[in-house]
Image (cartoon, rainbow, N blue to C red):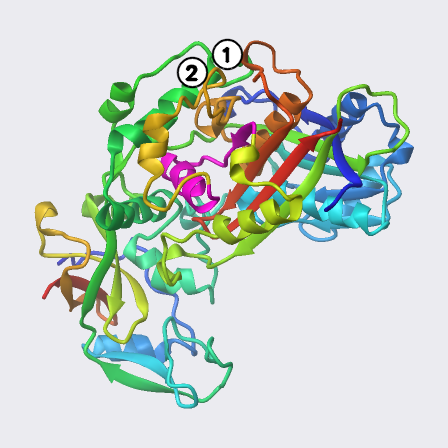
Amino acid sequence: MSTNVTDKPLPRVTPKTRPFWDALKAHRIDIQRCEDCHAWVFFPRLHCPKCFSKNLTWTTVSGDGELLTYTLSRVPTLPELADEVPQMLAVVKLDEGVHVNTTLVRLAENQIRVGMRVKPVFDDIAPDVTLLRYTAA
Amino acid sequence: MPDLAAIVGTAQYRPQRRQEAPAMFALDQVADLAGLAMADAGLAPSQIDGLAVTSVGFGEVRMFVPAMVGEYLGLKLNYGEVVDLGGACAVGMAWRAAAAIELGLCNAVLCVIQARPNPTDPQAPPPSPLARRLGATSAFYGAPEAEFDVPYGHVAQNTGYAMIAQRYAAVHGYDSRALAKIAADQRTNACANPEAMFHGQPITVDDVLASRMIADPLHLLEIVMPVTGGAAFIVARKDIERTGRHRPALIRGFGEYIQCKSPSYADDMLLTPIGPASRRAFSMAGRTPADMDMAQVYDCYTITVMLTLEDAGFCEKGQGARFVREHDLTYKGDFPLNTHGGQLSFGQAGMAGGMSQLVEAVRQIQGRCGERQVKRHDLAYVSGTGGVMSEQGALVLEGMA
């Protein structure tokens, strides 16, 4: 994958979301789970959006899931991402049920199918930043 | 059923490309549009006692917008509000104004969205590169999108709508010619509207499909073109004293539904907020989709129109393409849709783009649409859509007998 990405927009990490990004850096996927109603929570919050409990714990998951939808953007969605065109933008539904915005990699356009099983790809785009991309399982 | 509030006047700038548009301070645009709408309604400034504006596009002010606008216009207000619903602002303003009037809070509400460029501040620092083209996406510190969307390139609206369309294709099948027909039929309407951006430029289904693919499956001619402009309307008690003689359009039913900022997080991105919003509007009005003489449907993309036709109940879920194939959507046809050309062919003047649908519905109801006037014009359905199917609103309008 690309290495020179200083111009690309990087995640603006906050104390609230730091555990997620630290886990990705270690090539692990940690998402929050509500200890009270057991709902999985993504993106990170301080509260459970189902029951409003603040009793959330970071839990490691496989990251496996299915492709909910995708598009191939033929024009860059940001000038800084021009080298990624066609951008394979996608939404993945993790087996835990939460939806994650991502991009697909290592796939030809004609290999992409809504509903296909996908697995995570840890993309170390900068020394201390790893993005969660996806490819066919 | 709401029976007291009606839209009694409208104003709309002709859409213009940004480089051709006059730069005007937002306050002056609002004052100009207000004057035009009051003249159309036959109302005096002293009769306006309510105000709905957006917070977008004011170079002069970020907070306390209604007070500043009211002061600048010289209005004394019983009701002032900023509506922040993107393309659903116009519909949102209309029902909020109607509700305020039904409750006896005020008599006449000016609803206005200005979308011409502001003069450049000679002392302002240049905008940061990333702030340029994010559309509805927020890259501010702490915004979930700044972390979980922007780094991946999930930015602005095109790809969000494209992903909804792609999922629709997987679940229900996809007839790209039917989607293209929406754009072509609306262009026919625009060719009967001298105010439309694309007046005099007819297109065919094949033209749409031959246009550049932007984000699969959306072609360039299925995507709205940003322009500049602005619009205003006045909601008033139907019995207000006025010199205008145009037929009032009663606000009979309304609904609103806010689902998610991003459709990615919707439980089912194919069940759009216009469903619950429209069901409430029709139920309130005591009408059904089949009763409508026209549909003025928010159309940032062709897929938006088809999903709205389905979820608002004009046809069954999954039957949108068949519905489009089987109906003539032009002003001459059996299902007049976006008779001004829609935003796709009229032009999308920022947040005022969604007001073009409402203005067209009112002017059709008033019988003022010239060549494109539809024959039966008593009942109109109007929808508004903000973000990526994030927030939607619906109105049922009825011409006063």
Question: How many numbered circles does the render carry?
Answer: 2
Q: In this view, does B104 lie above or below B16?
A: below
Q: Residue tagged by mark 1?
A: B192
Among the 4 quarters of the image, the one containing residue B42: top right
In the rendered image, which quarter is residue B9 located in?
A: top right
Relative height, residue B132 to residue B249 (above, below)? below
- Tag 1 near tag 2, CB within 8 Å: yes
Q: Residue at label 2?
A: B188
Choose between B1 and B265: the one closer to the eye.
B1
Secondary structure at badge 1 equals loop
Which residue is found at the position 37% from the left and 27% from the top? B182
Left or right relative to B305: residue B169: left
* Dot 1: chain letter: B
Report the quarter where the C terminus of chain B lies. Answer: top right
- Residue B67 seen: no
Tell me the residue at 61%/28% (across/down).
Answer: B361
Chain ID for label 2? B
Residues at marks 1 and 2 on the same chain: yes
Question: Hey, what amino acid is under mark 1?
Answer: Ala
Q: In this view, does B184 lie above or below B174?
A: above
- Where is residue A91? Give x, y as percent: 27, 59
Res. B371 mark:
none
Residue B156 is situated, as x and y percent measured from the top left of the image, at 40, 47
Query: Would residue B256 be seen by someone viewing this image from the given angle?
Result: yes
Residue A56 left/right relative to A81: right
In the image, residue B342 sits, relative to residue A35, either above or below, namely above
Depth check, front residue: B293 or A29: B293
Measure the alpha-carbon separation of dots 1 and 2: 7 Å
- Region rendered in magenta: B293-313
Pick whichever, B262 or B269, lies toward us: B269
